[in-house]
Image (cartoon, rainbow, N blue to C red):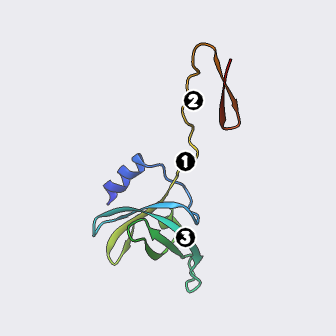
Amino acid sequence: MDDLVAELKELMDFKETVEVGDVALVASEDPKMLAFAVVTDITRDSSRKAEWWHVSMQMLSVPLQPMTWTLRMPQMCGLEIFTMGGKKMYMAPVRILYGAPRPQPVPEQGTTKTHTKGTARLRVVK
């Protein structure tokens, strides 16, 4: 699991903190699994003195599978590998870039001009 996590940290852009609505990468040692989940809720486990949190997620599978894990902050933020039932697990929130820049089309040569206003593209032909 240590080698897998080291490789994932090189391949993925992980966030430092986790919030409701984040997509998290979830890895399991046994059964071997690598999947994504959406974090749907994070609530404090008031039954413990130490800070533990109930992290509710929906596994992005067909059908969607709800699950809730009780974790400490370093475990839910990808800072620690942890165990559940003696099996190694890992969870880390993924940074997803929305609205990535798109390549701009090259203006045509000749008598046409391309004007831009906002995101709409107009073409004036003389």
Label 1 residue SS: loop
Residue 88 at x, y percent in the picture = 34, 68
x and y percent of residue 110 in the render? 60, 13
Name the foreground residue: 9 vs 20: 20
Q: Earlier in the sequence, mark 2 or mark 1?
A: 1
Q: Amino acid at mark 1?
A: Leu
Separation of residues labelled 3 and 1 (CA atoms): 19 Å
Q: Give the residue at mark 3.
A: 40
The answer to whether residue 79 is seen in the rendering is no
| Residue drawn 54% across the image and 32% down it | 103
Q: Amino acid at mark 3?
A: Thr
**Where does the N terminus fall, quadrant-wise?**
bottom left
Query: Residue 74: x percent and y percent?
Result: 50, 65
Q: Is residue 74 visible?
A: yes
Q: Which label belongs to residue 104?
A: 2
| Rendered view: 52 above or below 111 | below
**Secondary structure found at label 3:** strand
- Using residue 6 as the reference point, say whether residue 106 is left or right of it: right
The front one of 16 and 36 is 36
